[in-house]
Image (tube, grey):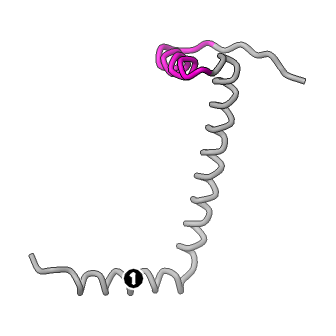
Amino acid sequence: MANAISVRLDDDALRALRVLEASGLTRSEAIRSSLIESADRRRRRSALAAEVAALEANADDRAEILEIAALMDEMRAPG
């Protein structure tokens, strides 16, 4: 069952909605898909941040990163 909501859109949101509607989406489709895509991006960012934190917490990974950085510095052309 769908839930109806109401929102107040600012000028930027209205412009974005018009772009989505111009692509053939209904107003409801545009809003629903935008909400889902935004939530997915936040979940992916959160998962990536957790992965980065885990890598940073791993002493072996940090040591390997430093070794690679040192190797890259050695390989860099002078100047």
Callout 1: 10 Å neighbours few (<14), some, many (20+)? Answer: few
Vertical side of 57 occupied by 38: above or below: above
Q: For the C terminus, give its image quadrant.
A: bottom left
Viewer-proximal residue, 76 or 27? 27
Residue 44: say if magenta. Answer: no
Vertical side of 27 occupied by 44: above or below: below
* Residue occupied by mark 1: 66
Viewer-proximal residue, 51 or 29? 29
The quadrant in which residue 68 appears is bottom left
The span shown in magenta is 8-24
Q: For the N terminus, give its image quadrant.
A: top right
Say which residue appears at 70% left-offset and 27% top-offset. 32
Q: Residue furthest right?
A: 1
Across and down, in percent, residue 39 comes to: 66, 40
Vertical side of 62 occupied by 38: above or below: above
Residue type marked 1: Leu
Say which residue appears at 80% left-offset and 16% top-offset. 4
Residue 22: say if magenta. Answer: yes
Say which residue appears at 60% left-offset and 66% top-offset. 51
